[in-house]
Image (cartoon, helix red, strand yellow):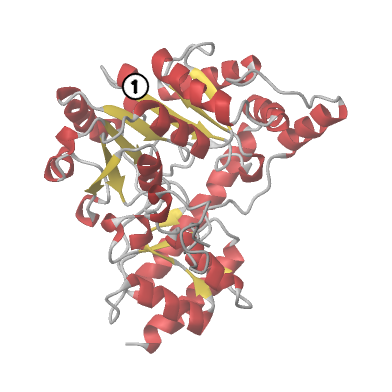
Amino acid sequence: MSLDDPGAETEAEEPLTPSRRVQETPPSGIRRFFELAEEMDDVISLGVGEPDFTAPWNAREAAIASLERGRTSYTANRGMRELRERIADDAERWNLSYDPDEEVIVTAGASEAIDAAFRALVNPGDPVAVAEPCYVSYDPGVRFAGGEPLPVPTRAADEFKLTPEVLREAGAEEAELLVYCYPNNPTGATMSIEELAPVAEFCREHDIGVLSDEIYADLTYTEDHASIAALPGMRDRTVVFNGFSKSYAMTGLRLGYAMGPAGAIEAMNRIHQYTMLSAPTTAQYAAIEALDSCGDEVAEMRKQYDRRRQFVLSRFEEMGVDCFEATGAFYVFPEVPDPWTDASTFAEELLEAESVAMVPGDAFGSGGDGHLRASYATGLEELKLAMSRLERFVEGAR
């Protein structure tokens, strides 16, 4: 009621109105297809980026033992020193060297580490180059930090590898930071140290910092993983992200980490200590054991993923569906087959007709237009059935 006119009604303002940044951020395209699939029976999902394996028994046993011994208190903000030491030691196999006291932080998943980096290192209005197709959190993370995402679409002709050419075409020389993921989600692309070298030169020339998401580092199939931080002049301008979700099938334990220059890690820790305080204690004990004794299990999972990768690629070839040879992570990124021209239409019709869920490539940015993401992080028998259903669907439209 108005005080001037007791009989007049006024429109009440919503006291908890979401911020403009949130309102302008669309829901995840992946989540939309998960929700559609959940409403149907007998769906085989090739959209989930989660291992179908369980965490190695030794790691689970260490987690159980920590609980039985009552180790349920907070740890240091940066994570248990014993774990940070193991992380630093493990990074040496990628020719990376970090001080566990000053240059390593343990977080609640790699996603938290990436979010903390955006908020710690991005100033309002800063342009941040985002190599696309990419993990769906990068663009919103930049926006939530007040930055301006600068899309850098990679090309199928380059097997979705990042190059100086696509960086220049996108105007990335104006960026303060470059964020990317290799091995790549969603394409399965990888980059060798030789292919990363010209990207590093571009970043040094234009004084660009790098946020390198290497969560799939253990899942490469044709050559060993390479990190841009190992190249000359890149260590002090790069933050490397990794974690235990993919390699060790520990997704639900929510444990990741970042390695980088002391100043950047300290800035990230300042965000972390006010928002998360410390990563889950039980998961940290599991991670120590995982790094100490679970290498054989990781190797076996990688072997099984590679078998699935080769099967899926061969089946796409038999169907006449174009798909470059993905060499990392657990995704392939086929082109939308004829007669369809739109990935979303294809994915929705496939889900409706054959109960197979794939994610349209444009859910991962404009660089994914005309493609679909298929995850082979599911059992081989399910993959065989999904490929048979997909073949029937595609052949029926030709």
Q: Amino acid at mark 1?
A: Ala
Residue 324: give x, y in percent of width and height. 31, 58
Q: Label 1: which residue? A: 230
> Does 23 sit left or right of 173 as displayed?
right
Q: Is residue 360 left or right of residue 59?
A: left
In the depicted structure, whether residue 71 falls above or below residue 303 = above
Residue 106 seen in the current view = no
Q: Position of residue 62 (x, y in %)?
A: 77, 30
Q: Residue furthest right?
A: 68
Which residue is rendered at x = 60% and y = 70% of the image?
38
Q: Give me the residue at 39% from left, 33% from top.
A: 118
Quarter assignment of residue 396: bottom left
Whether 256 is drawn above or below 94: the answer is below
As rendered, which of 35 and 226 lies closer to the eye?
A: 35
Tally of marks: 1
Q: Quadrant of residue 131?
A: top left
Question: Picture coordinates of residue 137 (x, y %)?
Answer: 43, 47
Q: Quadrant of the C terminus?
A: bottom left
State left or right for residue 271 relative to residue 342. right
Tell me the residue at 42%/46% (across/down).
328
Front residue of 260 and 320: 260
